[in-house]
Amino acid sequence: MSSEADVKSHEKKGIKKTPRPEIKHAIAVMSGKGGVGKSSVTALLASGAQKEGYRAGVLDADITGPSIPRMFGLKASPQGKKLTPAESPLGVKLMSLNLLLPHEDDAVIWRGPLIGRAVSQFWEDVDWGELDYLFIDLPPGTADAPLTVMQTIPLDGLVVVSSPQDLAVMVVKKALKMAGSMSIPILGLVENMSYLVCPHCGEKIEVFGRSQGEEVARMTDVPFLVSLPLDKDLAECCDHGRVESYDSDLFNLLSQAQKKMEIGGKVK
């Protein structure tokens, strides 16, 4: 478990962020717990950026539970001496451990140091080329992989994903505190699975309880981006490798929030 002591210990060891000037913006997507749709939010942000004419990529830092390639319909790709990202139908560049495994359901049974090295390698050694946005899909929690990303990658900010349950809100606050201790700006909070729209009458049903996204954003002084519904169409698109065919305004909302923070002097 990471803590302020862990952070200070790593700082004393002289860990430095590795710049990649060809990547204009690096944004990590984080959640306090699993099962809140963090990877689908990452995929929607990347595909949205690509549709808007930006050059986008996804670094899948969820080493032991990678799901990004499946969402984009990509499988293992042969690699040479330098790691080369795969490309989605729309041109989003992707690097994930699942692209390097013989079978996508092979288990990755690694300890923390190996996971951290893999994440660092995906940032430092992958031939990303020129990118406007690289979105980094973090594993849930505040352990080794998120710590490695925040300490070694010069992030422009974080997007935090939550859901309405009290438990999810509690662990989101942990993630926000970790980001604060690392001086990483929060670009926005996304509440996923906020409600379900009845296909027959159009009524909004709060399946997991009352929405708390805006309230949590106010309490923690972070921008609230959007409440996303439970959507059967999105689930099917992700399951069948067609996430890019799903229409979403999520990237535009993030872009607007980022511009506001830049104007306010919070993001350089």
Image (cartoon, rainbow, N blue to C red):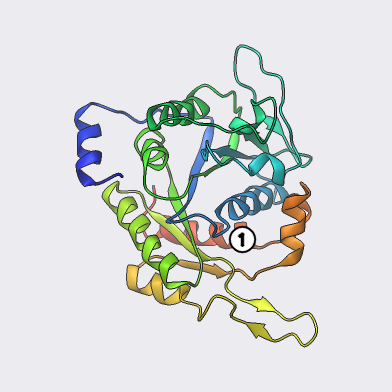
Q: Is residue 259 left or right of residue 95?
A: left
Quadrant position of residue 135:
top right
Q: Position of residue 248 (x, y in %)?
A: 69, 61
Residue linked to disc 1: 250
For this orientation, the residue located farthest to the top is 81
- Secondary structure under tag 1 reads helix
Q: Residue at x 66, y 36 (%)?
A: 105
Position of the N terminus by quadrant: top left
Q: Is residue 3 left or right of residue 49?
A: left
Q: Residue at x 56, y 66 (%)?
A: 192
For residue 18, above or below residue 8: above
Q: Position of residue 149 (x, y in %)?
A: 41, 38
Q: Is residue 204 left or right of residue 177?
A: right
Q: Position of residue 166 (x, y in %)?
A: 42, 72
Q: Residue at x 71, y 28 (%)?
A: 76
For residue 47, above or below residue 110: below
Q: Residue at x 29, y 28 (%)?
A: 15
What is the number of callouts on the image?
1
Q: Position of residue 69 (x, y in %)?
A: 68, 39
The reply to whether residue 85 is visible in this rendering is no
Label 1 neighbour load within 10 Å: few <14, some 14-19, many 20+? many
Q: Is residue 129 left or right of residue 86?
A: left
The reply to whether residue 128 is visible in this rendering is yes
Check disc 1 and give the amino acid type.
Leu
Judging depth in this view, the residue of 264 and 62 nearest the camera is 62
